[in-house]
Amino acid sequence: MLSRNSLPILVLFLFFQFSLLAQNSLAEKLGYQPDDKLLIIHADDVGVSHSENIATFLAMKIGVVNSGSIMMPCPWVAEVAEYAKENPDADFGLHLTLTNEWKYMRWGPVAPLGQVPSLVDSLGFLYSDCLTFGQNAKVEEAEIELRAQIEKSYKMGIKPTHLDTHMGCLVYSSPEMFEVYLKLGREYKIPVMVGRFFIQAAPQSFKDKIRPEDIIIEKTLTANTTDYDSGLADYYRNVLKNHSGGVQILLIHTAFDNAEMQALTIDHPYWGAEWRQQDFDFFTSKECQDILREEKIKLVTWREIQNVIFK
């Protein structure tokens, strides 16, 4: 027989177990079986350049790319807003941006500089990496900037279907930054991208920020530098042929290897113009479409998830 003192512990344990079941049933909430192979093919960095934009739009039209995320501080975001208005069913979220990694293409925050001084260097540009950002940024100023990016998207006619984080800064910097990331998603009713592997590997201080209603993607997958060196197409074939079931997301970067992208990504051999051209080529290829069909992979979108979770 349970003692009076043990009853609250049991209740908490059962609540936690039911929460895990709810997280595991995202595929079922979307109307699929729990072991169905569901995939979002997601293009990052939309808005960073004209080349990035038109390659992504084309990959959505003739290829299998079915989602993208927009960098609101970047110079070509107006082109994306126009496309989103003309294509209201397109699945676009926000690539929440607090860093700026390129050598010559530099941008500052969306919020006024006077409101977010800890987010910028002496020239008013965002820091180039997550480490420097984490060492300098105040959480309350980061929240001001993130809200400014979300609000700007709405003002431009974009209705974000999800939130993710450029270079992973909001996921890895601190538990407090991670909490802001999750909080904004709940407040604006926009799904936030968080992968189950991160949650399993993260310190308890990060795990404590997760609530049962937060959406956990089974796997978030993206090529790294060794995959590029050994062949991106081989990496993508392997990912698609080894889908283990549930909702997974494959993060890619689609652009053309032209003069604009070569200049933007100068001195960046990785994630540069050639890398992005290879992403475009594979995900607009017949081979990719054939693999999806043979492996019985079903493409789903963040919009579907948003509609189910935030009815």
Image (cartoon, grey):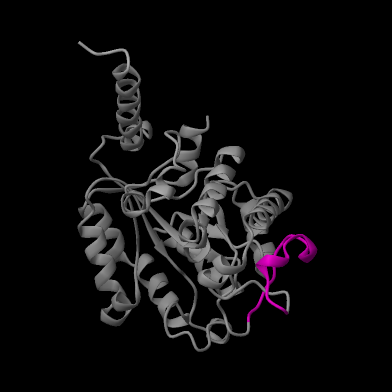
Which x, y percent locates residue 187? 60, 38
Instruction: Indicate whether 296 appears above or below 98.
Output: above
Q: Nearer the viewer, residue 274 or 167?
A: 167
Residue at position x 34%, y 69% in the image: 223
Which x, y percent locates residue 13? 30, 27
Which x, y percent locates residue 207? 40, 45
Would residue 294 appear left or right of 118 to someone viewing this image?
left
Q: Nearer the viewer, residue 74 or 86?
A: 74
Examine the image and state in which quarter residue 20 appears: top left
Could you tell me what secondary structure mostly forms the magenta stretch? loop
* Residue 187 highlighted magenta (yes or no): no
* Residue 120 highlighted magenta (yes or no): yes
Residue extending furthest toward the bottom:
267
Instruction: Indicate whether 56 appears above or below 232.
Output: above
Q: How many marks?
A: 0
Which x, y percent locates residue 14? 30, 24
Per the rendered image, the range of residues in magenta is 105-122
Q: Nearer the viewer, residue 105 or 49?
A: 105
Quarter containing the N terminus:
top left
Q: Is residue 2 visible?
A: yes
Examine the image and state in which quarter residue 136 appears: bottom right
Residue at position x 57%, y 80% in the image: 102
Examine the image and state in which quarter residue 239 appears: bottom left
Would residue 139 appear left or right of 310 to someone viewing this image?
right
Residue at position x 53%, y 58% in the image: 69
Q: Is residue 53 visible?
A: no
